[in-house]
Image: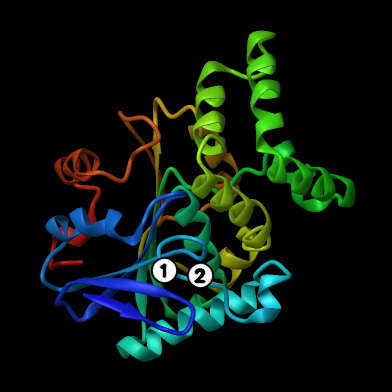
Amino acid sequence: MDNRLEALTYKTYGIGSQAILAFHGFGHPKEDWQFLANYISRDFKIIAVDVPGHGDSQFVSVDTLSRPLTKEDWKSLVLQILQNEKIDAFHIVGYSLGGRIGMVTAEMLPSQTRSIHLFSPDGLHKSNSFRFANELKLGRWIFQKLIANVRLVIPVVKFLNRIKIISDVKRKFVLYQLENNDRVAQVKIVWSKLSLLWPNLDTIFQENNFSEPFQVYFGAKDPIILPEYGKPLLKYERENLKIHTLPFGHRTAKPEALEWLIKEKKWPFSSTDY
């Protein structure tokens, strides 16, 4: 069932009384989580949200068209969903970009977050290129110029790949994003409009004791979100913080991964005992 609020769109799957907020990856729609309905018990209901810049989700107001969304902006948007669905508490599932959004959600709404499950999550490692394009005035200016002239960027990326500065995998990934106008628009949104939605891990773990799991799933063959990006979590010595490495690539949010987790007894939502 599709639901439209002022700024966000979302779809619900399942009929349970316990809610799972699910956030998709970059360039993907909320419908990516439809498969998840086959791997949860009747106790749960999935609320799959279109991240701003994806699907039919929009920015909040004229004001936010000219600046990045803040964490308070995002909190207000999520609260609208909770009010609309009459939800007091929720679990979080996030994939890639959605992992970063999920962690920000937990940071801003700690008392309502019951557990967190992140697949190949962005938000644990800031690349130098992201810092340059978002945290330095010169970098922001250069990024805006490049995004406005992507045809000039493509040969540069290919050249950097030829001289071994950029790997084949990253070349393919970057070119895939830049060779389509819609994907270019989404790159601009993620790297500028959503740049402030970056989780503060210290705050997350200070505000939430996590009596229920905080689980992170990395792909052993992932060339984009490397398993080593989970190292910042290791300083938080919590019994319920679990980091898993799955025998997959970047796409860890998929039926094969859930089947593997269920077989290994590492997926709590398939059991009514959770």
**Mark number, residue 105:** 2
State the SS at label 1: loop
Which residue is labeled 1 in the image?
56
Pick whichever of labels 1 and 2 is earlier in the sequence.
1
Residue type at tag 2: Thr
What residue do we see at 51% from left, 62% from top? 53
Q: Do the residues labelled 1 and 2 touch (CB within 8 Å)?
A: no
Q: Position of residue 152 (x, y in %)?
A: 71, 30
Horizontal side of residue 53 vs 48, given as left or right: right
Choose mark 1 or mark 2, whichever is in front.
1
Horizontal side of residue 193 vs 225, given as left or right: right
Horizontal side of residue 48 vs 259, given as left or right: right
Residue 258 location, quadrant: top left
Q: Distance between the residues labelled 1 and 2?
A: 20 Å
- Quadrant containing the C terminus is bottom left
Q: Position of residue 35 (x, y in %)?
A: 19, 53
